Image (cartoon, rainbow, N blue to C red):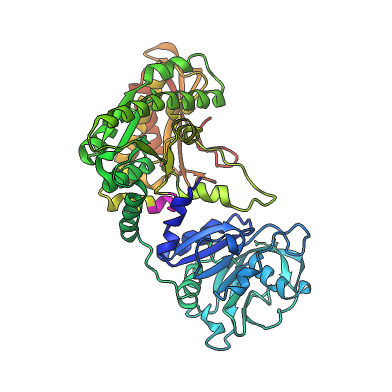
Amino acid sequence: MATTIEQAEAPHQSFDTLLVLDNGSQYSHLITRRLRELNVYSEMLPCTTKLGDLAFKPKGIILSGGPYSVYDPIAPHVDPAFFELGVPILGVCYGLQEIAWRVGKENVVAGTEREYGHAIITAQRHNDHVDRLFKGLEDGMQVWMSHGDRLAALPEGFVTIATTTNSPFAGIAHKEKPVYGIQFHPEVSHTPRGTDLLRNFAIDICGAESNWSMPNFIDKEIARIRKLVGDKAQVLGAVSGGVDSTVAAQLMKTAIGDRFHAVLINNGVMRLDECTQVQQTLQQHLGINLTIVDGSELFLGRLKGVTEPERKRKIIGETFIDLFEEEAKRIEKEAENTPNAGKVEWFLQGTLYPDVIESLSFKGPSATIKTHHNVGGLPARMMNGQGLKLIEPLRELFKDEVRDLGRQLGIHDDLVMRHPFPGPGIAIRIIGEVTPERVEIARKADHIYISMIKEAGIYNEMSQAYAGLDTSKAVGVMGDNRVYGYIIILRAVTTTDFMTAEPYDFDHSLLKRIATRIVNEVHGVSRVTYDITSKPPGTIELE
Ligand code: GLN
């Protein structure tokens, strides 16, 4: 994924960085997020990382939770060299157990029962050194526990700094060294003051500067892009009208102006008026060098008769690459003829940190497989076939940081807050064969649905919403005639990470008004349903 050049200029070189070593907990990435919310830059790496492989010196290290038991022969263990580095260390759950186990294997045992859920902390005060972790945190603090193993004894050299009724060692600290461990999870929202504890660790104990903010990031990132690309090379990038590609494009434009070329490929399964809107925003409003390629007939032609979801995705992905490659060649040719222009050397990709984390995280026994809606294979073909290098200016950012960055770069809030839209577009929101007629119906229904959600002022309360289409038909009576029409499936979910999601709690009368308008205004629809499935077991998209 990353090129070595990019690594050399990464934010961990210019911002104080806390390293999270991931032992495989489902919450590990949340530690990184919480630290970033405190304006402390943090990165996550797998627990198997060797100190020698690290390209920077962290200000402190947090060992995350994990599904294994430290005493299990196959359990992962942190490189002991991290403990010799002299920087503060905080162990969370498995991380605490790892600290205790390193001191004495007999210190960690299987508990008689699991402790899962809320617990109340009583802090034990000793002296200025060990009290720092719970500084300002009153007794009775609510915390979240999720463990089966427990500390059987206090490791040598440590004192107890917190207890709960079930955990006599809910928090421990080394008497002299800045090494701390807690049995509970400070990173989850069920530990309301967990962020304060992480602040105590990151800022007071590690001494990290809280300067991680998007205005600070922009200047450094623009300088980095300019240095990477130089003053001749051209950069190519695909845009979709979504937040990530727009923000990435605007960053490139700010850094290198017209030497960045954005390409929008109309795949025929975009939303109503989407191409025009993207053109307005990117070209007219943001002044980005944009080319629109109309591939709608080609895409819809290739999708004809195809019903299998994976096949649909593949066709769309491949057609996209075909057209994009052609465009890349054309831009390259044109660039050759301009006096000051150089070759197209870079390909822009709007990869975000969750994708990086996904590929880096330590896969425990409960590893889940995430399927991406992105266009597969594009970077590989662009890099191998065209010899392009990958540039990923958002690869260190979480989604909310990208939104913040977008605002800083002057991108309109409507776009910044836009719900995600999959690469294969409406094609995977139509169950079954995609035909121009069905795309038109789904598109119109979606437009009514989203407009009414916006009018009701609830768009930002949901993380993603759309109208899909079921290609089997249901009977309806309209104007005293029996008609058979498609079934529209309305979906709206709330989620923080898109890994799990809940259906949005709609006001019933609003849903009814939406249904009425869709049936009345969209010819070919006889029913409207609302999908109330959670994820899991459902997914957010229909296919
Ligand atoms: N697997 C360990 C236990 O059950 C650690 C759990 C955790 O880190 N959440 O105690």
Residue at far left of view: 284
User: Nearest the camera: 392 or 300?
Assistant: 392
User: Nearest the camera: 473 or 192?
Assistant: 192
Residue 273 visible (yes or no): no
In the rendered image, residue 134, in percent from the top left (x then y), is placed at 53, 78
User: Nearest the camera: 342 or 61?
Assistant: 342
In the rendered image, residue 438, in percent from the top left (x then y), is placed at 42, 19
Left or right: residue 498 compared with residue 260: right
Left or right: residue 84 compared with residue 417: right
Left or right: residue 249 compared with residue 397: left
The number of numbered badges drawn on the structure is 0
Q: Splitting the image into four quadrants, where does ligand 1 fall?
A: bottom right
Residue 397 among those drawn in magenta: yes
Residue at (44, 51) in percent of width and height:
6
On screen, 236 above or below 202?
A: above
On screen, 7 above or below 534?
A: below
Residue at (52, 70) in percent of width and height:
60
Residue extent of the magenta highlight: 395-401
On screen, 94 above or below 165?
A: above
In the rendered image, residue 394, in percent from the top left (x then y), is placed at 41, 49
Residue at (47, 59) in percent of width and height:
33
Residue at far top of view: 481
Residue 468 among those drawn in magenta: no
Left or right: residue 296 compared with residue 164: left
Residue 323 visible (yes or no): yes
On screen, 102 above or below 351?
A: below
In the rendered image, residue 165, in percent from the top left (x then y), is placed at 67, 75
